[in-house]
Image (spheres, grey):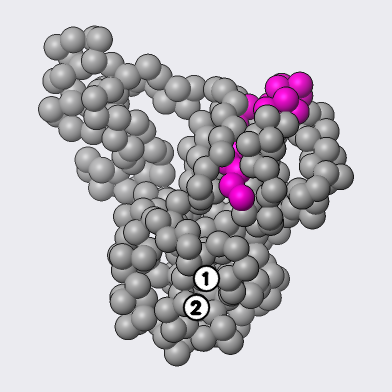
C-alpha cells in the first residue's frame, strides 16, 4: 500500500531554485515520486511512497522554514501513484493567467471549516456552493446543489468574471476544490472584482478534508478526481454511495475515466465496461479504427488503464 500527500502553502520563498534542488534531494533519498511546483510565493505538491517515507517527509517539512504549518492531506493508493519525480520552478504554482492579481499579500476569502460547512448544509443554509475545478472533475463528483461554472479549465476563471458577478454578488458564496489551493487565487480574484469579503468563503482543506470526516454521511456525491494514476478516489465508501457520471457512449451511469488508446488523441472520457470493450478503450469509432490499422498508434498503458 502506498501513501499519498497532497499539500500547498502560500508563503514567501527567497530562492525557489535552491528549494527545488533540496526537494529533489530529499524526495530521492526517501524514494518518493510525484510533482512539486515552487514559485516565489509558495509550494504546491503531491508525492507518494511508503508509509514510513511519507512520515519522514512530513517530519522534514514540518521542521523546515518556510514549509512549517502545512495543512497535509494524506490518502492511500493500491498502485504506484506517480511513475517519476518532477520538481519544478514555476511562475505560478496553480495556473490562473492573472498572477499579478492573485499572489503576494492580496486579500483572499476567509476559510470555513468542514464542520461549519457541513452544519450549514444540514440546516439548509442559503448559500451558493461554487465549484472551482475543471469540468471533467465535476463530471464524476460534486457537492449536492453545487454550481458548475461555465469554464472548462480553472485557468479560464478570469474570462468569465462577468458571469460570476451577474449571478452571485450579494449572495453568500462558498468555493471549493480538491485540496483548497485553487480557491486561494479564485477568491482573491473575486474579491478584486467586487465581491464582498463578508459574503465570500472558501472550504478549508477542500473535498479531501471534508471527505476524511464526512465521506459516508456527508453532502458530497460521486468520486473525487485526483491528478495521479488513481485518477479518481471514492468519497463515500458505504452502500449509500451514488454514481453521478455517465458513459460517453451509452449514457449509463459510470465513474470510470479512460484515456483514449489512440496516442494521437489521448482524450479523457467516461465509459462503462461494455462500451469500453466494444470500442477497444477508444473515445470514438474513428479512434478505434486508427489503432486497428496500426498497433504503433496505441498509447502505452498506465497502471490504471487497461485495454478491453
Examine the image and state in which quarter residue 60 appears. top right
Q: The residue tagged with tag 1: helix, strand or loop?
A: helix
In the image: residue 136, left or right of residue 209? left
Q: Which residue is drawn at 61% across and 50% down?
A: 40
Q: Where is residue 214 in the image (x, y as percent from the top left)?
A: 66, 61
Could you give the CA–CA distance between mark 1 and mark 2, rounded to whole angstroms?
5 Å
Residue 231 inside the magenta-drawn segment: no
Report x, y in % for residue 114. Answer: 67, 67
Q: Are marks 1 and 2 in contact (CB under 8 Å)?
A: yes
- Quadrant position of the C terminus in the picture: top left
| Residue 157, quarter of the rendered image | bottom left
Asked if the stretch drawn in magenta spans residue 35, the answer is yes
* Position in image of residue 208 (x %, y %): 62, 53
Circle 2 residue? 191
Q: 40 and 58: which one is in front? A: 40
The tag on residue 188 is 1
Residue 149 is situated, as x and y percent measured from the top left of the image, at 35, 66
Rendered position, 297 above or below 254: above
Give the residues drawn in magenta, as a range: 24-40
Residue 168's place in the image compared with 19, above or below, is below
User: Residue at image x 55%, y 62%?
Assistant: 103
Amino acid at each position: 500500500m502506498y501513501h499519498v500527500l497532497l499539500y500547498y502553502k502560500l508563503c514567501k520563498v527567497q530562492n525557489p531554485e535552491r528549494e527545488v534542488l533540496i526537494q529533489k534531494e530529499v524526495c530521492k533519498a526517501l524514494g518518493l515520486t510525484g510533482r512539486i511546483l515552487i514559485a516565489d510565493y509558495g509550494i504546491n505538491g503531491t508525492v507518494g511512497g511508503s508509509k514510513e517515507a511519507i512520515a519522514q517527509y512530513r517530519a522534514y517539512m514540518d521542521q523546515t522554514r518556510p514549509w512549517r504549518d502545512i495543512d497535509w492531506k494524506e490518502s492511500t493508493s493500491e498502485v504506484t501513484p506517480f511513475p517519476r519525480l518532477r520538481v519544478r520552478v514555476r511562475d505560478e504554482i496553480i495556473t490562473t493567467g492573472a498572477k499579478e492579481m492573485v499572489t503576494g499579500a492580496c486579500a483572499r476569502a476567509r476559510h470555513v471549516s468542514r464542520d461549519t460547512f457541513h452544519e450549514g448544509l444540514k440546516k439548509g443554509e442559503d448559500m451558493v456552493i461554487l465549484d472551482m475545478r475543471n469540468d471533467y472533475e465535476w463530471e464524476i463528483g460534486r457537492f449536492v446543489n453545487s454550481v458548475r461554472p461555465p469554464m472548462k479549465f480553472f485557468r479560464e476563471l478570469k474570462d468569465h468574471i462577468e458571469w460570476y458577478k451577474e449571478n452571485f454578488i450579494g449572495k453568500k458564496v462558498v468555493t471549493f476544490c480538491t485540496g483548497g489551493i485553487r480557491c486561494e487565487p479564485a477568491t482573491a480574484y473575486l474579491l478584486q472584482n467586487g465581491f464582498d469579503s463578508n459574503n465570500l468563503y472558501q472550504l478549508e482543506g477542500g473535498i479531501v478534508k471534508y471527505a476524511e470526516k464526512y465521506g459516508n454521511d456527508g453532502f458530497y456525491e460521486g468520486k473525487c478526481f485526483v491528478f495521479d494514476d488513481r485518477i479518481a478516489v471514492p468519497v463515500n465508501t458505504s452502500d449509500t454511495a451514488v454514481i453521478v457520471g455517465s458513459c460517453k457512449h451509452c449514457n449509463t451511469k459510470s465513474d470510470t475515466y479512460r484515456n483514449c488508446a489512440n496516442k494521437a488523441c489521448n482524450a479523457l472520457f467516461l465509459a462503462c465496461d461494455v462500451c469500453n470493450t466494444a470500442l477497444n478503450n477508444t473515445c470514438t469509432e474513428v479512434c478505434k479504427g486508427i489503432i486497428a490499422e496500426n498497433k504503433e498508434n496505441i498509447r502505452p498503458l498506465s497502471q490504471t488503464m487497461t485495454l478491453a
